[in-house]
Structure formats: C-alpha cells, structure tokens
Image: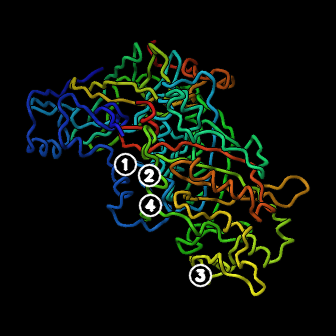
Amino acid sequence: MRKHTLISTAIVSTSLLLLSACGGGAEAESTETSAPVADSVEVTDAWVKAADDGMSAAFGSIENTGSTDATVVSAESQASTALELHETVENESGEMVMREKENGFTITAGQSLALEPGGNHIMLMDLTDPIKAGDEVEFTLTFSDDSTLEFSAPVKDYEGANENYESGDDEAGEHEGHDMEDMDHSGGSK
Amino acid sequence: MTPAEPGAGWSRRRLLIGGGVAGAGGLAALGADYASRRARASGTDESPSLNGEVRIPFYGAHQSGITVEPQAHATYVALNLKKGVAKKDLARMLKTITDDAARLTQGVPALADSEPELGTVPARMTVTFGFGPNLVARVAGDAALPEWLGSLPEFGIDQLEDRWCDGDLLLQFNADDPFTIAHAVRMLLKDTRSSADVRWVQRGFRRAQGSEKSGTTMRNLFGQVDGTVNPQPDDTDFKELVWNRDGWMTGGTSMVIRRIAMNLDKWDRLDRPGREQSVGRNLANGAPLTGVNEHDEPDFTALTPVGFPVIPEFSHMARARTPDRSQRIHRRAYNYDDAPEPGKISNSGLLFVSYQADATAQFVPIQQRLDELDLLNEWTTPIGSAVFAIPPGCDENGFIGDTLFD
C-alpha cells in the first residue's frame, strides 16, 4: 500500500525543516508544504549483478539526508520490464527467502539503507537485454510523494546473491549467469 | 588526455539527480566518505598514524606505481585475452578494473566486494595497468602499436621459459602489505575473469616497511646493493627519460619485466673479493671499488699496483655504463624467493623491472652490452621477459587506457 502523506507544492523554508525535525511526526496530518523527498536522498556505490537474461538485482546504499523519513515505493529501469523492491526474510520453514517488500523501502531520516546481497535489494524481474560487466544501468526510484531520483549503476560480475536457492540441490556452478532464475520468490508477483 | 564528456564517466553514479534540480547541499554531501578519503590521499589532511592508512593518489597525468618510492611488496599478473573479446568488451573491463583500483588504493572496498573489510588498509598500494601488443591491436589496430612494444631481441644469455614471458594485459600491484595486495588481486581477477585468463603471476619483495630508513637502496639476494644509479623523479631529465610523448601513449611509459634467476649455490663458491669484482662495487655499502660511499662516482681509469683496472672492464657496472645519457632507465626491481624445485634448496632471483620512454632505444642497448660481456652472467640467467605499454593516467571521468579508445 502506498502512502501519499507528503504533498510537495512549494519550496520548503528553513524554519519548516527545523519544525519538522523537532516534531518527529511530520507526515501526520501534514497539510503543510514540503520539499520533494527525492531531493534529500542519495544513492551511492550502486551496482548491478551481470546476467544474460531473466533476473538480476541492484545493490548500493540509499542515504536519507533529510529530516523526515523517505519511502521508496517503486523502481524503474529500461533494463527490465518489471522491477520489485525485495527484502530477505526467514520463512516458516526457517529458510531465508526473498519477497516483495509491500510498503517499499523506508529510510529513516538521517540514516542509510543498505541494499546488499542477502538483504534488501532492487530486483530486476525480466531483463530486456543481457547486462554485461562494465555496462551502466539507469534506474529511477519513485518516493511516496511521487518525487523521483535517478541513478546509474555499473554492472559487475558477481558469483553471490544466490542465497535463496532451495536447500540441498544447489547447482550454482552449473548455472553461471542464470542464478537468479532459480531464486525462490515467495512473495513475488511474477 | 581527452576529458570524457560530462556525465559519461562512472563518477556519475555518485551524482544524484533528484526529482528537481540537485541543490548545492545535495552535491556537497555526495560520496562523503570516499571524498574525504581522497582528500586525505592528496595530502589535505594530517598524516595518518599507521602506514596501513597511507594512500597514494590513483588519478593523475601518469599512472601511479612508477615514481612512488617502491613499496615493500609487488605482484605482477599477466593475462591472456580470451578469443572474441573485442574493443567494446575491453572498454567495459578497463572501466571496471580502473574503478576497482581507484577505490582499493584509497582504502575503499570495490563495488561488489565480497570481503569489503579486506579493502580498507591501502598501505601505500598502487595498481598499474600495462598493455601487450595483442590488446593494443585489438582495440586500435596495428597502427597504434608503439614500435618498441613486443618481444625483446633474443640475448645469448637468455634461457627464457614461456611461463614467464609476454602477456596481453599486465596488472601490477605494489603495497607495503602483502595482505592488501592479495585482496586487490582477487578483486581485479574476478573482474577480468570473463575476458581474460591468467598467464603468469610473479611476486617480489623488498625490505618490509619500517625496517630500514626510507630511500635506502635495495639489496638483491646476492647481498649486493642493487639500483644505486637510477634516475629519480626529481631529476631534471627524468620526464624525458621515462614519459612517452607519442600519440595515445603520451604520459605513459614502456615497462620491461625480466625474471632473472640467481644461482645462489654457485654464488656461494665465490669469495668476497670475487663477488665485489663481478659488479665493481663493494658489498658493505655498495660504493664503487674506487670510492668510499655508495653514490661516489666510479673511476674507471684507476689501476691496481700491478696495472689492472680497479673496476674490472668485465664488471656489471662497467658494462652497464655508457657515456650516452639517453640510454638510461628507471629501475624498480624486486627480489623473489620461491619454493625450490625437488632436490634444490633455493629458487631465487630478481624481478628486474624498468620503465623508460622507449624500451628499444634505452633498455636494449644496455642489455646488449651486458649480454656480450658481464661477469655477473656467470651466476644469473634471464628466464622470463616481457614488455608492456603502460598507458598514461586518467581522471575521474575516464579509465586507464581510454586514450587508446579515442
């Protein structure tokens, strides 16, 4: 479910920023103006796992330098027909599995959210073309206030990000470049 | 160097374009940690207390790892390009490993670094890239080949083994900490694996950092002071001797790396006077046999009481010298001491490494004289040899070797 509690209509003033910081609950019943969330968010050290087809994933660090929490609700890229925001959680059987994070990624004010193999990540569900190490993939993140943030991530060869194989029949070595296809997406909507 | 068009380089990933126009505040905050590390590397912060924290700048007009005071350890990795790897693949690979090197030399883990904790102790690491003729030709055709790039002429003393010769791409790692090098080698080889295979790896060492005063001339495993006469970056003619000024190689240099096996067992049979005569320098401090201090000028005309030259004409020093001041090279050698072959007790020698604007004009004539006559040849045997084109450095929007792709 998406929240649209922030309405960006005008330029924020310094005093409002201070107010928000002190109030701690800026989004509650806020009808006041606010700067686009994307303006205070930075993506650094982004990278994407190389893959010939099927799925891949993007990682990096999302930093929220603003004074209110920021929520990424969706991601887009020309590299994939669909993207999902994923988290890794333990399922009923005790396995670590990936699933779509329903309310998106929330980055607490002043904090960073790490996207990393084995944790949160941006899933490229179906690559339109092979992405090869050294390529650049462009992404657009959309926040809960509909503001957007573009970033570019280089592609890297990476053997990991396979942690969600079904146990016992790990054949990673025989599926080089296609590892993501075998991932268990318990919450995925594919 | 041709600057990349704005936004075309990888630095763009650190640029954030918000929904609106990025303000000064956003720009100021980007890559804060990386930027501060880089600031420290360029000497704008106080000196670090640990040698492990010392950073050598990566970006610049020349590649690092050539003029910096030699680090304690070196690893040289030569790669063979896989079949079918073309210009665009090489550009992608070089971008990737340039970024890896730029980060790791500054103590910042590489992107997709599986062991990021191992990437935070740069210990003066430099990573330097060199191109063999095959890589240059694949990217820009034979016309781009420097005439000196290729195998050296055969020398009579050579007993070259293919496993130590040539290569398409050279990765040179130097640092004061071999652990730092091990991780960097691992990281870069993961990023070259899809395009290239390892051809050879050679590792070398000098005295550990802090064991001797900085600036002390190294010794080789024969015990000789090795490298006394060596053009230094602050010499007035250093630029002319080392930096190439030709086309895409402007600001680059040529590198000769030769694996010189040293027969320590045979050397054992030679007593101290013979050892000193073989080179023309004393063993105590490396002074010429006609002098007192290491850097004294040798007197080749001085004679012994019975009329022989004090510095024998067949000595290494006498043969290496020439009045032609253009025939000089910048040496940066390392010792090696590997596991002995069965039945032996040593497998040691020297990784002779030199940089010069033109290997054919500067290195070859010296080596030819040594090949014709050098007493030291009795105990040394070149078993490996390669020449690489070391491209110029790059800025943050470019990658090492980008001038070849223009």
Image depth: mark 2 or mark 1 in front:
2
What numbered label is drawn on residue B237? 4
Q: Identity of the amino acid at label 1?
A: Tyr
Q: Residue at x 67, y 68 (%)?
A: B318
Mark 4 residue element: loop
Q: Nearer the viewer, mark 4 or mark 2?
A: 4
Which residue in the protein does label 3 denote? B293
Q: Tell me, yes or no, if residue B181 can be seen here.
A: yes
Give the numbered dot on residue B34.
1
Q: CA distance from mark 1 to mark 4?
A: 36 Å
Of callouts 3 and 1, the N-terminal one: 1
Callout 3 and callout 2 share a chain = yes
Q: Nearer the viewer, mark 3 or mark 1?
A: 3
Which residue is pictured at 59% across the width and 81% down the height?
B293
Task: Using the rendered view, name the quadrant where residue A153 is placed.
Answer: top left
Q: Are marks 4 and 3 on the same chain?
A: yes
**Real-space Cα separation, disc 3 to disc 2, in angstroms:** 38 Å
User: In 3D space, how far apart are the residues under numbered discs 3 and 1 (Cα atoms)?
Assistant: 46 Å
